[in-house]
């Protein structure tokens, strides 16, 4: 791994942030672009998201001088400004079903009950900040990362239009399915429930050769990156699970001199990019924070019924799709840097 990042902070703490190490010196750091990426993910923009309003204003602390990366670690911070920790006092000693409360408590012997603390999806704001810098790197190479929502509550897109996703308030890929998807989200919200969804994320313009077999395969690392996002329960590369019911004669991507005739493989063969679009489907579970009364237990192992308070996304996949883009960008940028030394003539050319 050449490009490394870590995040810090909690949902109701003072701030969130990240440290990104391995960015080559001399990259133009467009702070307005980084902020625009955070604005796409930030909460409170519409009725389809949590009502918690955060500016998510990013501040660069290190690693940038006169608008250029210096080659040293880039640290960024995002201050929390709209916490309502009192909404969580009723769950101080209660495990919320579907959340990490139970596992965090049993692993560490304590937990930050305010919005889930470190386990909150609020942490993903820092991932988007890091991913924005990775995207700035990829733009220099003509590589673009795109995403959109292909499914909500079982309502599936019949076509994938990434330009429509850019304009849609729920990042819908199919304008014909968008209204039905919106209705499903609002119906669940009005019933104090939530729905799941699927993000389709692609990388366009990647060269052949990204990926390090056998133990740092591109598809393996991408899957690991996506599964590390809150609420993600499954990942597909290319045709994914449909490949298991296909014939080899139909699943293989035939090759001609001008390229592949299809892309069932999702742009990856043997863990290495083949030059086609890299295609992933990322599956988000319904937001576990719902306002229906639920059965659970307390930290003292007492059975109780409780109703949650607070401000939560009725469909976490919507803002989650931006996080998927960011994680793909970080992985692809890392693979680009790793691939530079895969051939001796490339090493000689550089040092010559």
Image (tube, grey):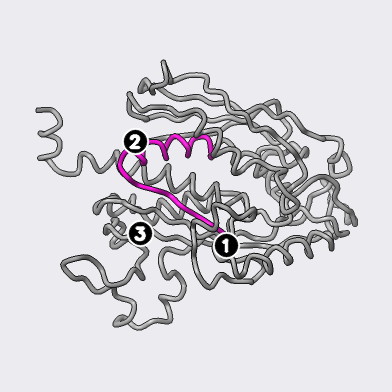
User: Quarter holding the C terminus?
Assistant: top left
Instruction: Name the N-terminal-most of marks 1 and 3.
Output: 1
Q: CA distance from mark 1 to mark 3?
A: 18 Å
> Of helix, strand and loop, which one carries label 3?
loop
Q: Position of residue 110 (x, y in %)?
A: 74, 37
Q: In the image, which disc is placed on residue 311?
A: none
Which residue lies under the disc numbered 1? 198
Q: Position of residue 54 (x, y in %)?
A: 70, 35
Which residue lies under the disc numbered 3? 277
Q: Is residue 167 magenta?
A: no
The residue that appears at 42% across and 40% down in the rendered structure is 135
Residue 76 quadrant: top right
Q: Which class describes the residues within 10 Å of circle 2: few (<14), some (14-19), or many (20+)?
A: some
Q: Say left or right for 98 vs 135.
A: right
Magenta residues? 128-150
Instruction: Name the N-terminal-most of marks 2 and 3.
Output: 2
Residue 262 quadrant: bottom left
Which residue lies under the disc numbered 2? 2
Q: CA distance from mark 2 to mark 3?
A: 23 Å
Q: Which class describes the residues within 10 Å of circle 3: few (<14), some (14-19), or many (20+)?
A: many
């Amino acid at each position: 791994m050449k490009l490394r990042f870590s995040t810090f902070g909690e949902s109701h703490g003072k701030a969130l942030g990240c440290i990104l190490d391995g960015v080559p010196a001399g990259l133009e750091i467009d702070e307005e672009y980084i902020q625009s990426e955070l604005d796409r993910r930030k909460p409170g923009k519409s009725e389809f998201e949590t009502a918690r309003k955060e500016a998510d204003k990013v501040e660069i602390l290190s690693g940038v001088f006169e608008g250029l990366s210096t080659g040293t670690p880039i640290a960024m911070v995002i201050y929390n400004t709209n916490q309502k920790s009192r909404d969580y006092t009723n769950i101080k000693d209660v495990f919320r079903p579907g959340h990490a409360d139970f596992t965090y408590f049993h692993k560490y012997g304590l937990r930050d009950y305010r919005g889930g603390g470190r386990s909150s999806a609020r942490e993903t704001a820092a991932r988007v900040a890091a991913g924005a810098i990775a995207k700035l790197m990829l733009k220099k190479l003509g590589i673009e990362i795109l995403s959109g929502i292909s499914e909500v509550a079982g309502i599936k897109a019949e076509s994938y239009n990434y330009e429509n996703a850019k304009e849609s308030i729920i990042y819908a890929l199919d304008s014909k399915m968008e209204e039905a998807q919106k209705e499903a989200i609002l119906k669940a919200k009005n019933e104090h429930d939530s729905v799941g969804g699927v993000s389709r994320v692609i990388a366009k313009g990647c060269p052949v050769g990204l990926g390090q077999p056998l133990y740092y395969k591109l598809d393996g690392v991408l899957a690991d990156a996506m599964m590390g996002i809150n609420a993600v329960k499954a990942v597909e590369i290319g045709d994914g699970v449909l490949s298991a019911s296909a014939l080899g004669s139909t699943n293989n991507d035939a090759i001609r001199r001008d390229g592949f005739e299809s892309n069932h493989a999702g742009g990856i063969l043997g863990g290495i990019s083949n030059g086609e679009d890299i295609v992933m489907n990322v599956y988000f579970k319904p937001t576990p924070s719902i306002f229906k009364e639920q059965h659970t237990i307390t930290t003292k192992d007492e059975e109780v019924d409780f109703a949650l308070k607070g401000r939560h996304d009725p469909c976490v996949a919507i803002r989650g799709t931006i996080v998927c883009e960011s994680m793909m960008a970080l992985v692809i940028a890392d693979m680009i840097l790793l691939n530079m030394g895969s051939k001796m003539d490339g090493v000689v050319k550089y040092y010559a």
